[in-house]
Image: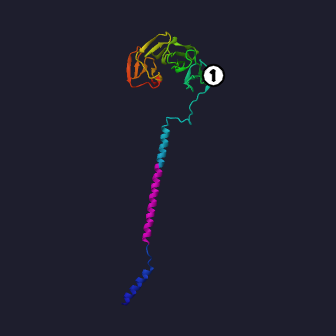
Amino acid sequence: MSDMETQLRSALNDLAEEVRPAPLLARLDQEHDRSVRRHRLTVAAVAAAVVTVLTAGSLVILRMDPPSIVEPVQRPPKIFRLSDQTSASPGRVDLAVSLASVREAEDKPAYLHPATGTAAVRLPGSDVVSWSWTQHLSADGTRYVRQENSYSDPLLEIVDLRTGRSDDLGGAKGYCPELSPDNGRVAYYSNGAVRVLDVQSRSSRPLLRRGTVGVEFPCGGWLAWSPDGDLLAIGLQTGTVLVDRGGQVVLRLPGMTVTNGSMSWS
């Protein structure tokens, strides 16, 4: 080996000793970790932005469209109190409530809430109707119509709540009585027909001769006056018919029944 080669080898050895190894794998691992952290931060930022937008949108929608149902905690429902007072003349009333009896032999007391806002008073029975099978308030809240709880002797009665005067309708008998909106006529079932009785003259006439109801006259929607009193919805076993004052059928609704008496009319 020549002197030049010896010197070159010595120089290369010296350079090799001075060179430090480069950690390429470690650098690659560091770059990967930084990339993962940047990705996670980006995802978190996007998610936070989405949540913020949704929350703000929900608040705007809630403020623009208030709920249709008012929770009791925000506006408690009105409560009326029952009193021990009994009166047949409480005046015009806003609400009538019939309490179910505990035993079959007991009466079903009716409580009336006067329009003046005082405590609800109990409406007493009478010699005509001591125990009501069905009872309801007139459209203007001034009269109370009821039927005696007797299958063979279903006497009818109208009580004027302003004066306390009781009207036995001349001894009329029938089932499921419904007073017209003008308080001038009473419709009821009698002997397989629907009859209409004039309160003043006591005269009655059949309006429909084939009006038969279900078992034991359940009432509650079988007869319903229109608000103007010109039409009467009559429930039959096959459906409902609407008749005018003269008894002419103006509409047939097979398989349908009035759901809540006169309140079903608009």
Q: Tell me the quarter of the image containing the N terminus.
A: bottom left
Seen as rendered, the residue at the extreme left is 1
Disc 1 crowd, CA 10 A, few/some/many (<14, 14-19, 20+): few
Where residue 24 sits: x, y (%)? 42, 71
Q: Secondary structure at mark 1?
A: strand
Residue 180 seen anywhere in this rendered image of the structure: no
Percent coordinates x, y for residue 247 in the rendering: 40, 15
Please determine whether, in this image, residue 197 is positioned above or below residue 39. Answer: above
Residue 150 is inside the magenta segment: no
Q: Quadrant of the C terminus?
A: top left
Vertical relation: 266 (above or below) 61: above
Amino acid tagged 1:
Gln
* Residue 197 shows up from this direction: yes
Residue 239, quarter of picture? top left
Query: Image point 42% across, 70% down: which residue?
Result: 25
Q: Quadrant of residue 258?
A: top left
Residue at 46 percent across and 57 percent down: it is: 40
- Most common secondary structure along the magenta stretch: helix
Decide whether residue 32 is among the magenta residues.
yes
Residue span colored magenta: 23-50
As drawn, is 94 to the left or to the right of 256? right
Answer with the quarter of the image where residue 101 lies: top right
At a point 48% along the width and 48% down the height, the residue shown is 52
Residue visible at 43% across and 83% down in the picture = 14
| Residue on which the image places disc 1 | 85
- Of residue 119 and residue 55, the one placed in the foreground of this image is 119
Residue at the farthest bottom position = 2
